[in-house]
Amino acid sequence: MDSLEVYVKNKIADSIATKQKILGNESLLQQIKQAGLKCIEVYKNGNKTLIAGNGGSAADAQHIAGEFVSRFYFDRPGIPSIALTTDTSILTAIGNDYGYEKIFARQLEANGVKGDLFIGISTSGNSKNILEALKVCKNKGIFSVGLSGESGGAMQELCDICIKVPSNTTPRIQESHILIGHILCAIVEEQLFGKGFAN
């Protein structure tokens, strides 16, 4: 085995190890479960999810929203979800008029209502625009779920639930964030349109 093969195997092993830490952490598993139950409640009440992040986390926000709106495991009605990272006119207008730290907060002020759920994604837990968005959630009665890395950063004090992936390495955190996003999508889809979890 050459050095590049070893490098590839080590990266895969690191990713698996991070997910095994999540699997072995009962508190984290309960947080994921509670976030899923809250999503179900929000959708049953006719509300929506709003999701945001920066960079790779912006892509994750769009990915998760896409799974809700289109489909995940099977055909069913669309589930309302908005990624706050996609409209360049809105993003650049807010960034220009109010500053980059307000790009998500302003959208929540405009489109978020009490009873909605916001998912804020930040590997550091310190993204200023996510923190500003979480403050709006507090003011408007929007339930908030944070996805962060091990430290939780400043966002853990502002979230209703802060799911902290047990890693300080950005790629490993992001890989786990999309796993958690997929689990939330699966929970909602199964409970609302599948056979549920009675068995």
Image (cartoon, grey):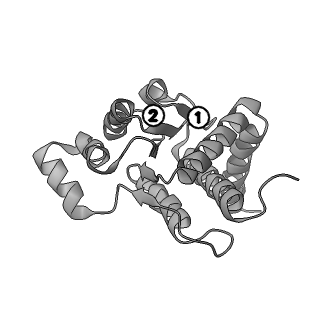
Give the percent coordinates (x, y) of residue 105: 29, 42
Report the residue at 76% width, 32% height from top.
26
The percent coordinates of residue 63 (x first, y second) are 50, 62
Q: Residue 4 appears in which quarter of the rendering?
A: bottom right
In the rendered image, residue 64, in percent from the top left (x then y), is placed at 52, 59
Q: Which mark is residue 164?
A: 1
Q: Is residue 3 visible?
A: no
Tag 1's secondary structure? strand
Measure the alpha-carbon separation of dots 1 and 2: 9 Å
Q: Is residue 138 visible?
A: yes
Q: Residue at x 44, y 30 (%)?
A: 155
Report the residue at 80% width, 53% height from top.
197
Q: Earlier in the sequence, mark 1 or mark 2?
A: 2
Residue occupied by mark 2:
125
Q: Is residue 195 above or below residue 112?
A: below
Q: Circle 2 sits in a helix, a strand or a loop, which is it?
A: loop
Nearer to us in this view, 103 or 196: 196
Position of residue 22 relative to residue 5, above or below, is above
Q: Name the amino acid, label 2.
A: Gly
Judge by depth and name the residue closer to the eye, 169 or 196. 196
Q: Which of the 4 image quarters holds residue 131?
A: top left
Tell me: residue 119, above or below residue 155.
below
